[in-house]
Image (cartoon, rainbow, N blue to C red):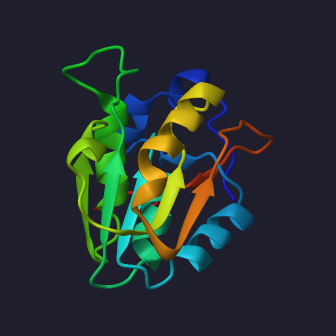
């Protein structure tokens, strides 16, 4: 496991997007392995919240070869909207796997969603009301036997796992 960058400026998303550091997921190796066990072979995978794409890459690597990963993240926290470095870093990270395909969808996607979901990861806005709203909006699409997982972001000693950047 790689530690977070020692210089705060290196922790910013533009630095990851430019390939000067790997993106970091806010999870431990055990959490990474658990995500991959639960998503293994599944075909319709949805992640709410993308950050720099570390969890999305873990999901994409383990889902079914013919699966689709749908990523929902508004990337509204970017200081420079036209540049949107967190979104660009996430795209580069998720492109690190050629397994299945991935589609970026809007936060309003549930209003016209029609398919059943095999695995649903809640990792967006971590405020209690936001999580409750995401659950109420999306849980009805879970296929019988489908799995819902919740992740709470955290910062911990040593940082998160690095995402392998696409070439």
Instruction: Give the residue furthest to the top.
Output: 79
Horizontally, residue 1 falls left or right of residue 162, namely: right
Residue 59 image position (x, y, % from top left): 46, 67
Count of labels in the image? 0
Horizontally, residue 163 falls left or right of residue 27, namely: left
Q: Residue at x 52, y 30 (%)?
A: 10
Residue 24 vs 165, above or below: the answer is above
Residue 115 image position (x, y, % from top left): 27, 66
Q: Residue at x 65, y 29 (%)?
A: 128
Q: Residue at x 37, y 83 (%)?
A: 64
Horizontally, residue 154 falls left or right of residue 51, namely: right
Given residues 149 and 7, the one toward you in this image is: 149
Q: Residue at x 20, y 48 (%)?
A: 112
**Residue 91 in view in this figure:** yes
Residue 149 image position (x, y, % from top left): 60, 58
Instruction: Give the residue furthest to the right.
Output: 157
Q: Quadrant of residue 99?
A: bottom left
Given residues 160 and 99, the one toward you in this image is: 99
Residue 28 vs 79, above or below: the answer is below
Residue 120 vs 51, above or below: the answer is below
Residue 20 image position (x, y, % from top left): 41, 41
Q: Which quadrant is home to the N terminus?
A: bottom right
Residue 45 vs 84, above or below: the answer is below
Q: Which quadrant is home to the C terminus?
A: bottom left
**Residue 18 in view in this figure:** no
């Amino acid at each position: 496991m790689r530690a977070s960058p020692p210089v705060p400026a290196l922790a910013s998303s533009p630095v990851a997007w430019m390939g000067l550091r790997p993106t970091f997921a806010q999870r431990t190796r055990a959490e990474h392995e658990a995500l991959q066990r639960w998503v293994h072979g599944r075909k319709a995978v949805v992640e709410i919240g993308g950050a720099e794409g570390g969890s999305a890459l873990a999901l994409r690597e383990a889902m079914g070869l013919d699966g689709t990963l749908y990523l929902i993240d508004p990337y509204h926290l970017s200081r420079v909207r036209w540049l949107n470095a967190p979104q660009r870093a996430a795209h580069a990270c998720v492109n690190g796997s050629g397994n299945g395909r991935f589609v970026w969808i809007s936060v309003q996607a549930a209003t016209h969603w029609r398919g059943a979901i095999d695995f649903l990861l809640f990792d967006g806005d971590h405020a209690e009301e936001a999580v409750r709203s995401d659950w109420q909006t999306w849980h009805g699409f879970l296929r019988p036997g489908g799995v819902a997982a919740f992740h709470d972001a955290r910062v911990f000693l040593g940082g998160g796992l690095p995402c392998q950047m696409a070439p």
